């Protein structure tokens, strides 16, 4: 089943619980289910992109801080999908391109990627943290319409950017979360109608010091929303961040050796 993974960078679970009105409305209608995840440590961006996309914790992957600028030495969702002959795409921060396509990122070469032989075949990548989420979702939809990917990663940054500038408890941070929920309400009904399985989560949260990286609940507790026929929608589960890679690979129907929260998935028909 084709799958879209949305990683809302920096969205703390405590804000997601009251700001994501559209996502919770879909859940209330029986179309999805909400869970809480505890992110791996350190609660930093590049290490957790790697964790989400490979299932490997930072201390094992070696991507232990944001300055580790090299290709991943693990197999990611993109690698498994390409090995199975599936099509991959990403609208994401440039660190994702550096992890799985080419490192270091070259703005002119890599901003718009059309590279059928690379793990991420089609991409729109940005490097400015204030790059508008509205544009990023449009970038993602452009990739979906033009390339019909089996796996699409969507990774906006404005929530995290607002948290670093204004803190967890600021109206700016909360309103950026609400805006992301609004963009999802614009695009997600069409994805679901087209048969996509949709996962919405975050890499890490945010604290009132305008940072993250530690073990505070507001830094480590993140939301997980799942939508589509591929999910069981059982409420009392405790999925792990390290299981997201295996969950996506299982939805895509491809062979992998990653951990999976099997209860999260619907029984095969």
Image (cartoon, helix red, strand yellow):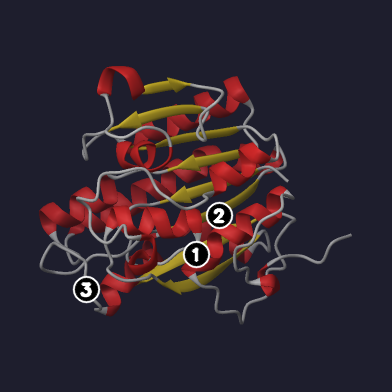
The numbered dot on residue 192 is none
Q: Which of 204 and 103 is in front in this view?
A: 103
Report the Cα–Cα distance between label 1 and label 3: 20 Å
Residues under numbered marks 1 and 2 in contact, where contact means CB atoms less than 8 Å apart: yes
Location of residue 79 in the rendering, given as x and y in whole percent from the top left corner: 56, 43
Find numbered disc 3 in the image and state the secondary structure of the residue it sits on.
loop
Residue located farthest toward the right when viewing the structure as drawn: 269
Give above or below for 146 relative to 42: above
- Horizontal relation, residue 86 to residue 224: left or right: right
Q: How many labels does the image show?
A: 3
The numbered dot on residue 199 is 2
Which label lies toward us, 3 or 2? 3
Q: Is residue 135 visible?
A: no
Report the Cα–Cα distance between label 1 and label 2: 7 Å
Q: Which of 146 and 253 is in front in this view?
A: 253
Q: Residue at x 52, y 35 (%)?
A: 119
- Horizontal relation, residue 68 to residue 241: left or right: left
Residue located farthest toward the bottom when viewing the structure as drawn: 236
Q: Which of 39 and 224 is in front in this view?
A: 39
Q: Residue at x 53, y 48 (%)?
A: 5
Residue 60: name its quadrant. bottom left
Q: Which residue is drawn at 30% across and 43% down?
A: 70
Q: Which residue is drawn at 49% across and 67% down?
A: 242
Location of residue 100 in the rendering, given as x and y in whole percent from the top left corner: 43, 40
Location of residue 243 in the rendering, given as x and y in whole percent from the top left corner: 55, 66
Residue located farthest toward the front when viewing the structure as drawn: 73
Location of residue 183 in the rendering, given as x and y in whole percent from the top left corner: 43, 41
Find numbered disc 2 in the image and state the secondary structure of the residue it sits on.
strand
The numbered dot on residue 214 is 3
Label 2 Cα crowd, 10 Å radius (few <14 / some 14-19 / many 20+): many
Give the mark, 1 or 3, whose residue is nearer the N terminus: 3
Return the residue at label 1.
224
């Amino acid at each position: 089943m084709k799958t879209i993974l949305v990683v809302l960078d920096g969205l703390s679970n405590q804000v997601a619980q009251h700001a994501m009105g559209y996502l919770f409305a879909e859940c209330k209608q029986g179309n999805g289910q909400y869970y809480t995840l505890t992110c791996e440590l350190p609660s930093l961006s590049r290490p957790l992109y790697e964790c989400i996309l490979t299932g490997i914790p930072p201390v094992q992957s070696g991507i232990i801080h944001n300055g580790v600028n090299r290709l991943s030495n693990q197999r990611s969702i993109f690698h498994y999908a390409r090995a199975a002959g599936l099509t991959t795409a990403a609208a994401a921060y440039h660190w994702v391109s550096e992890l799985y396509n080419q490192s270091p990122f070259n703005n002119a070469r890599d901003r718009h990627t059309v590279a059928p032989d690379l793990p991420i075949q089609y991409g729109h990548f940005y490097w400015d943290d204030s790059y508008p989420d509205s544009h990023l979702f449009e970038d993602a939809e452009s990739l979906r319409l033009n390339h019909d990917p089996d796996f699409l990663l969507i990774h906006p940054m404005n929530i995290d950017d607002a948290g670093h500038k204004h803190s967890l408890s600021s109206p700016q941070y909360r309103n950026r979360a609400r805006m992301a929920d609004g963009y999802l309400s614009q695009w997600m009904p069409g994805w679901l109608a087209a048969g996509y399985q949709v996962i919405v989560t975050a890499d890490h949260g945010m604290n009132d010091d305008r940072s993250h990286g530690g073990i505070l609940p507001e830094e480590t507790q993140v939301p997980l929303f799942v939508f589509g026929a591929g999910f069981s929608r059982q409420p009392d589960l405790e999925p792990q961040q390290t299981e997201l890679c295996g969950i996506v690979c299982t939805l895509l129907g491809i062979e992998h050796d990653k951990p999976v929260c099997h209860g999260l998935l619907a029984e095969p028909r």
